[in-house]
Image (cartoon, rainbow, N blue to C red):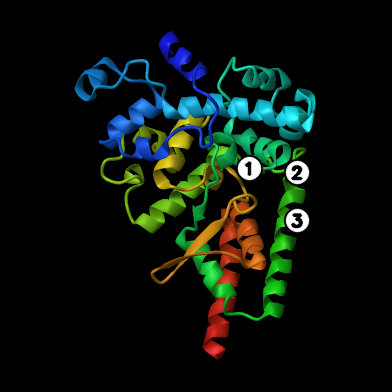
């Protein structure tokens, strides 16, 4: 990274959100928006669009801002780097580098959730973007909300007990030492979440962001949706960009249970409503935490119960 960009980043004060999201969203076309926010301004783009070559890429800037945010919060809580490491799995020397601004806050995708939830007590999105995110539930989870509205309180509790039993069994078979760490490979989790969005959009996965999906994002998405494609460690910068473009909180892509720290919404006809039913949220949280086969079976039972109640009314 050019020294001028680092100087620009270091001179930027900590603000919430970390960058002007509306200003970035206004930049067209998407290919340019992607490149200048995740990589750097090239000579060609600078000449054609008038951007400064030392412009700070928003997704990189946000990672440095996250380090400053972490530094402030750990200091206010009086928490040591060693304790933060014990709670999250992030190396304590790396935490030191992050809070001193030596490196952007970019731990592996699998450790961001335990760091955000266990150390910072906030969402992954708040940690990495400096703003509260939200999740408009994909259709399969929205259907759960609608189904649960149709059944009795007693039946809801019975479904929740069954879901908790399934989750307890899964956790027993796939034990994790650190709370909120994923029980399966995070790349698999990301792939499942991308597939849910692809299904809703009814499009080819490469065009998840529409016909203008940047080539770099197509390549990034491809590794999660093609079974035999060589997978690399998920690049946080690109994950953040995917979150930014879809409008879905980062938690949706990397947290096993994305309902814990982020408000969730669903569609009811033309309306978009927040899910307030805590039982529904708990069931959705368990469903999205389970592997594919167990998840599909549980979702089928919940939706089936809703349809059965609707038929009897």
Element type at mark 2: loop
Q: Is residue 270 left or right of residue 27?
A: right
Please state, as top left, top right, bottom left or bottom right, where the N terminus lies in the image. Answer: top left
Please state, as top left, top right, bottom left or bottom right, where the C terminus lies in the image. Answer: bottom right
Looking at marks 1 and 2 on the same chain, the residue that comes earlier in the sequence is marked by 2
Q: Choose top left, top right, bottom left or bottom right for residue 287.
A: bottom right
Q: Nearer the viewer, residue 175 or 126?
A: 126
Q: Is residue 201 left or right of residue 171?
A: left
The numbered dot on residue 59 is none
The answer to whether marks 1 and 2 mark residues whose Cβ atoms lie closer than 8 Å is: no
Element type at mark 3: helix
* Residue, far left: 48
Residue 179, percent from left and from top: 74, 42
Residue lying at 50% horizontally and 68% vertically, measured from the top left? 143
Cα–Cα gap, marks 1 and 3:
15 Å
Residue lying at 46% horizontally and 29% vertically, measured from the top left? 59
How packed is label 3: few (under 14 Cα within 10 Å), some, or many (20 or more)?
A: few
Element type at mark 1: loop
Cα–Cα gap, marks 2 and 3:
10 Å
How packed is label 1: few (under 14 Cα within 10 Å), some, or many (20 or more)?
A: some
Residue identified by numbered label 3: 168
Q: Nearer the viewer, residue 51 or 241?
A: 51
Residue identified by numbered label 1: 184
Looking at marks 1 and 3 on the same chain, the residue that comes earlier in the sequence is marked by 3
Number of marks in the rendered image: 3
Cα–Cα gap, marks 1 and 2:
10 Å
Residue lying at 49% horizontally and 63% vertically, measured from the top left? 266
Residue identified by numbered label 2: 175
Q: Is residue 212 visible?
A: yes
């Amino acid at each position: 990274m050019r020294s001028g960009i680092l100087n620009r980043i270091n001179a930027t004060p900590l603000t919430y959100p970390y960058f002007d999201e509306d200003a970035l969203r206004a930049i067209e076309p998407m290919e340019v928006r992607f490149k200048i926010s995740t990589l750097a301004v090239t000579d060609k783009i600078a000449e054609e669009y008038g951007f400064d070559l030392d412009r700070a890429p928003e997704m990189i800037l946000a990672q440095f801002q996250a380090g400053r945010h972490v530094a402030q919060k750990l200091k206010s809580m009086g928490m040591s780097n060693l304790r933060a490491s014990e709670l999250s799995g992030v190396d304590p020397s790396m935490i030191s580098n992050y809070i001193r601004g030596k490196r952007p806050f970019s731990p592996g995708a699998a450790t961001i959730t335990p760091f955000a939830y266990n150390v910072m007590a906030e969402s992954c999105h708040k940690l990495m973007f400096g703003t509260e995110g939200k999740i408009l539930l994909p259709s399969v989870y929205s259907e759960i909300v609608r189904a649960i509205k149709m059944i009795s309180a007693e039946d809801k509790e019975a479904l929740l007990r069954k879901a908790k039993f399934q989750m307890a069994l899964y956790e027993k078979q796939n034990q994790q030492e650190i709370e909120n760490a994923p029980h399966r490979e995070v790349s698999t989790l990301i792939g499942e979440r991308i597939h849910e969005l692809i299904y809703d959009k009814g499009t080819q996965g490469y065009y998840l962001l529409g016909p203008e999906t940047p080539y770099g994002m197509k390549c990034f998405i491809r590794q999660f949706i093609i079974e035999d494609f060589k997978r690399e460690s998920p690049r946080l910068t690109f994950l953040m960009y995917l979150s930014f473009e879809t409008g879905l909180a980062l938690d949706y892509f990397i947290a096993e249970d994305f309902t814990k720290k982020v408000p969730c919404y669903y569609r009811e006809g033309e309306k978009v409503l927040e899910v307030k039913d805590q039982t529904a949220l708990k069931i959705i949280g368990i469903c999205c935490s389970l592997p594919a086969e167990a998840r599909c079976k549980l979702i089928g039972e919940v939706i089936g119960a809703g349809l059965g109640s609707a038929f009897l009314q």
